[in-house]
Image (spheres, rainbow, N blue to C red):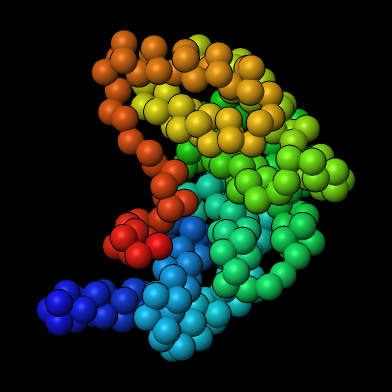
């Protein structure tokens, strides 16, 4: 047990130092992901230094975020926005996510309106937009008639239609996996489930036809370092 704790402590200390030096502020490989890891470590171990280091990283992300960044989920604006929504919903900070994320909501809606991309992947494509919308809606009540919630649900319907348009044109067969696990989550929101169920069946059929690797890439926001903490989260 002592040896495991030492390895865990060394890993955390290395990640803190890496986070300080990173120019990338994104979710998967940047400051945002390291901050979320440290917030969980702080909660698990009651280590106030980890919480302080996480706060500094989040402040740096907030100062450096720019719409010149790519929109993508992995290391772009949507992933950072999803990370902010996550830490608010987890109770790490107290804030109004509708206010903080209003501009990122607008970006997501604008991409759905414009159909400027035809990539379905979670990391850099349409599934990343879907994951962002999912986290924005997952803790809202079904009967929540807040204008922000209603607008997000409206654009979620448009996004599901967009996925249906592109799903038969998939070039990378691994995208069926990303679409499937996104749809599994969206089904929980009870928005347009008749269409979602149809697309789920199609994805499963294609995944078996092409012998695709089946892996839930959305687990823990896709942040690699959080896998170390999964037993305690």
**In terms of depth relative to the viewer, which is nearer, 61 or 178?**
178
Q: Quadrant of the N terminus?
A: bottom left
Direction from residue 46 to residue 183 in the image, left or right: right
| Residue 22 pos. (x, y %) | 43, 71
Q: Is residue 124 above or below residue 89?
A: above
Q: Is residue 135 visible?
A: yes
| Residue 167 pos. (x, y %) | 52, 17
**In terms of depth relative to the viewer, which is nearer, 7 or 46?**
46
Q: Quadrant of residue 117?
A: top right
Direction from residue 75 to residue 101 in the image, left or right: right
**In terms of depth relative to the viewer, which is nearer, 202 or 145?**
145
| Residue 124 pos. (x, y %) | 50, 40
Residue at (31% x, 81% y) in the render: 13
**In terms of depth relative to the viewer, which is nearer, 151 or 121?**
151
Q: Is residue 11 above or below residue 53?
A: above
Q: Is residue 152 visible?
A: no
Q: Is residue 163 above or below residue 55?
A: above
Residue at (50% x, 60% y) in the render: 26
Q: Quadrant of residue 112?
A: top right
Residue at (66% x, 20% y) in the render: 161
């Amino acid at each position: 047990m002592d040896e495991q704790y030492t390895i865990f402590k060394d890993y955390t200390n290395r990640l803190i130092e890496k986070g300080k030096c990173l120019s990338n502020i994104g979710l998967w490989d940047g400051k945002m992901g390291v901050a979320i890891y440290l917030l969980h470590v702080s909660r698990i171990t009651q280590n106030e230094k980890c919480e302080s280091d996480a706060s500094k990283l989040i402040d740096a992300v907030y100062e450096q975020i720019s719409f010149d960044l790519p929109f993508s989920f992995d290391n772009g604006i949507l992933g950072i926005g999803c990370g902010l929504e996550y830490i608010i919903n987890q109770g790490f900070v107290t804030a109004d996510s509708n206010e903080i994320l209003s501009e990122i909501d607008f970006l997501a809606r604008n991409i759905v309106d414009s159909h400027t991309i035809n990539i379905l992947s979670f990391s850099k494509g349409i599934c990343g937009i879907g994951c962002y919308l999912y986290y924005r809606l997952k803790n809202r009540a079904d009967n929540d008639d807040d204008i922000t919630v209603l607008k997000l649900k409206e654009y979620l319907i448009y996004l599901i239609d967009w996925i249906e348009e592109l799903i038969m044109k998939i070039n990378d067969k691994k995208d069926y996996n990303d679409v499937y696990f996104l749809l599994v989550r969206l089904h929980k929101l009870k928005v347009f489930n008749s269409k979602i169920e149809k697309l789920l069946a199609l994805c499963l059929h294609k995944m078996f036809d092409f012998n695709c690797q089946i892996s839930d890439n959305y687990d823990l926001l896709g942040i690699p370092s959080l896998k170390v903490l999964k037993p305690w989260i």
